[in-house]
Image (cartoon, rainbow, N blue to C red):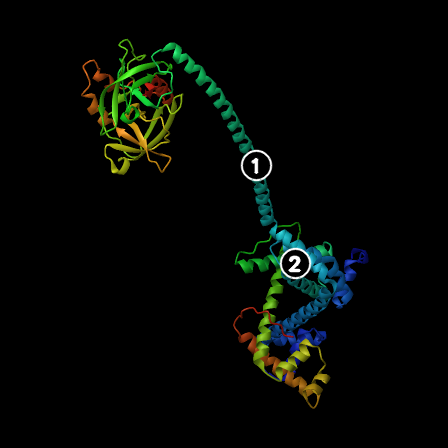
Amino acid sequence: MNESSNTYELIEKYCLDLMDEQEQAYFESDMQANPALKKAVEEYRLLLQTFDHAQNSEFIHRSLDSLHLHSRTQTEKVFTQLRLHVNKYWRTASVAASVAFLASILTFVAARSVYKKDTHTQYLKLRNEINTIKKNQADIASEVDHVKKSTEVPDEPSKYSGTGFALSQNGYLVTNLHVIEGYDKIFVFTQDNVGHQGEVVVTDEVNDLAILRIKDQNFTFPSRVPYSVRKANLSLAQRVYTLGYPKSDIVYSEGYISSITGFEGDSSQYQLELPSVPGISGSPIIDETGNVVGIVSGKQSLSEGITYAVRSKALLNLIKDLPMDFAKNEINNNLLKGQTRANQVKNIQPFVCVVKVYN
Amino acid sequence: MNNTLQEVNDDVLMSSLANGDSKAIQHIYKSCYPIIEKMVYKMNGSMDDAYDVFQDSMTILYEKAKANNLNLSCKLSTYLTAIAKHLWLKKLSEKKRQPFAVLYDGMDDQQDLAQEVQHFFEFENHVSKLSQCFEKIGEPCNGLLKAFYLQNKSMQVIAEEFGYTNPDNAKTQKYKCLNRLRKLFFSEPETVKTNERIF
């Protein structure tokens, strides 16, 4: 193909559709005969179209750019962006809003419940005071009763008091030796608040134990002793409870074995995490199935919750020395197994007594 | 803004657009751009995306108007919006490397629109390829070809600007340059699309 500028002029003329009919027919027949020319024409056409497109695109871009800039004032833009941002972030925003709403509701509820609690405790306190007054009146009345029922009980107030619990139906019971220390007369008050004079049968100074017997030959506890005294040693963290007389009414409290040795590593004792108050010395330590596993003997002076208990092993050793009228097998049988805690306590209650010492 | 927009016959609008009438462009911009901006934005686009899409749609419409081969079966604004939608979906699918799928939206000429968009992207690629060729071709061909084919300067003016003794000499030179450009253009492998413009 002759690549003269003349040919290119023809090609361009053809592509731009500037030829007259005769010229066009002549050129087309040339193209039929010459594939190279045909290819050149096609390539030229594409190039020219591309130029055209570039020009059109540039024209539109230029016209629109000036329009776009002029018509959109700054405020409009800001407004649109704001609107679009709202569209984009409405999910996040709604989650945040609901969290805030929930938080305010929770705060309201919490504030209300705290406020309620406050008034509640105040109310309890008040009632407690009224109860104390009532209690004092009842105490006075019952002391009058004692004097009537048991002429043997001295009129003057007792020097010490502690707790003891029954070992047999016929009137044997155990308490701490320190409770009866320096005694002149011992009186044992049973659940019905009747005092009975007691005598000391055997004591164990090392383990701070004393076994008493009600002097009255006719006295019996309401039934045989329901709990057993367990020989096996307890393990750490085992739950226990106790019943005692720190005041004129019986008090229940519970805790757990916090150490298997007692005060300053005393291996004859347990250390318990159990609230202790004066007057519960001699109380039975009872495990969950109703076995007596120890006797409360003291507490650590510095802390509130720590209580020491003598192991039941010492008590069992002491029992061996008891006279023949003591039924030893009575405390081998546990009648409380499988009962609920409340029932156990209810059944044990008659066998826990107040021990008062006069001198 | 709407008060100033009077109902204009679409055919009149198209013929004014073909002549490059800035008032026609302004009218279309004001009546269609908000719709298209909103649409692109709803389809995960930014404001810049919306403007790009609108410019490209307008380019297609302008070329259609110039070629005078658009038989509108619906309102011009509807047609432009449909084009913009196709364009945006195509761009999205390229971004995400997902297959291009257009939901049927009630327009009868979906196939035509897809072809228009396809055609448009082909030429966009050609243009970016052309700009790369212009970089390689060197002077005076670069300036000469741009002056004639893109800036529509006459051979007379070009001859004076580039220091040719007469327009015929310039013309001969132009054909030589065009031939070099053609060889460069068709020997180039398919290039990566760039956003560079010739101007």
Q: How many marks?
A: 2
Quarter of the image for the C terminus of chain A: give it: top left
Report the residue that reaches farthest toward the top: A218
Residue B195, given in percent of the width and then of the height, sits at 59, 69
Q: How many C-alpha atoms fall within 10 Å of the one at disc 2: few (<14), some, or many (≥20)?
A: many
Left or right, A342 with respect to A29, comes to left
Residue B72 can be seen in this image: no
Residue type highlighted by circle 1: Val
Label 2 belongs to which residue? B84
Marker disc for residue A109 = 1
Q: What chain letter is assigned to the residue under label 2?
A: B
Q: Quadrant of residue B173?
A: bottom right
Quarter of the image for the N terminus of chain A: give it: bottom right
Per the image, label 2 sits on a secondary structure element best described as helix
Marker disc for residue B185 = none
Q: Quadrant of residue A256?
A: top left
Residue type highlighted by circle 2: Ala
Q: Nearer the viewer, residue A138 or B12?
A: A138
Q: In the rendered view, tell whether residue B73 sits above or below residue A268.
A: below
Q: How many C-alpha atoms fall within 10 Å of the one at disc 1: few (<14), some, or many (≥20)?
A: few
Which of labels 1 and 2 is toward the front? 1
Residue B161 can be seen in this image: yes
For the residues beneath circles 1 and 2, the answer to whether they share a chain is no
**Cα separation between marks 1 and 2:** 54 Å
Left or right, A112 with respect to A238, comes to right
Residue A97, given in percent of the width and then of the height, sits at 60, 46
